[in-house]
Image (cartoon, rainbow, N blue to C red):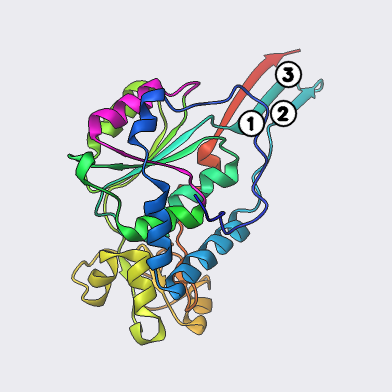
Amino acid sequence: MPHAPHFQNLPEKEDRPSARWPQWAAARQLDDALCAAAYEAAPPPCRAAIKTGLALACAHFGQGAQSRTEAVRDAQRGFWRRGISHAAPWAVVAFTPDYAAAARLAAACVPALLAGVPLVGAACVAEAPQTCSPHPAALVSLELSGVEDVFVLDLTDLCRLLEECQPGPGRLVLLHKGELDAAARAAEALGLPCWQERRAPLLGLPVPEAFDLDLLAFAQGAALEAALEPTDRRPPDALYLTPGAALGHCRERRSGPFPYSGAPALTPGCEGFWLHPGLDPDFFRVRRQAFGLL
């Protein structure tokens, strides 16, 4: 892709046996020109919002660690322990053609890159991949995130890709509303850790005029429409608040609806930022431990 990822200090790739996509997948790879065209067509403020979101993600998670080992020898208690942690060999972020939330797609990809995963691919999964391509907002998000391998697959080929990728297990992220359940079942059968977004998040937006709604629409897709006309009574997954209200949100004792909600609060200027709960660089790392007696 012609545009480098717009964040800094990614960990260097480690010297381990390199993962590769199966040879047949090259024919399913999206033309880089489509991503470049979507990038150029996107309004500059929308691109800038996603860049800001990427910078915030890097600041929040920090730089990923290289492979590291830990050894403990406790003679007093009579045991030893050894552990190792390193990046997973590969990761796939799969989504549907109508997935139009640029901020949430970036938030699904960046933790893998920050963890140092050497092979990160995105897969748009459609019933007729020959006639489909990702939503333009998704293409811009992938372009800015620096995901170079973008595939358009049907569900059968996605499951085949997961089965044939070696070494493994890698990691799988699914962004869907049930259409990719077969891939989740395949991942379970393969022992492949899988994280899923199975519904659009509920957004709390009590003061819409404080935010740039065009940027929020680009970042969140249809989730913004639901936030502007809320009917769901469940606690929101994120709150868009003024700076003063956001500071109040982080007090131990707070009033208002859902006083014990753990939803993050985002202020104006953070429209392009998102955090998926439970999806951080640690998800994309492999940890092994051994224990013994002295």
In the image: residue 205, left or right of residue 15: left
Quadrant of the rendered image containing residue 237: bottom left
- Find the distance from the CA under tag 2 to the CA under tag 3: 17 Å
Label 1 neighbourhood size at 10 Å, few (<14), some (14-19), many (20+)? some
Residue type at tag 3: Phe
Q: Is residue 260 visible?
A: no
Query: Residue at point 39% right, 74% down?
Result: 215
Q: What residue appears at the point 25 percent right and 39 percent down from the top-left corner?
A: 180
Residue 79 marker? 3
**Disc 2 residue type?**
Thr
Return the disc, 1 or 2, that comes first in the chain's sequence.
2
User: Looking at the image, which residue is at 18% across and 71% down?
Assistant: 231
State left or right for residue 83 relative to residue 144. Answer: right
Report whether residue 118 is seen: yes
For mark 2, what is the residue? 69
In reply to whether residue 167 is colored magenta, the answer given is yes
Q: Measuring from the top left, give residue 282's x and y in whole percent.
A: 55, 41
Which stretch appears magenta?
Answer: 146-168
User: From what the image shows, is residue 68 above or below residue 293?
Assistant: below
Write down the residue under mark 1: 85
Dot 2 or dot 3, earlier in sequence: 2
Disc number at residue 110?
none
Query: Of callouts 1 and 3, which one flags the residue occurring earlier in the amino acid sequence?
Result: 3
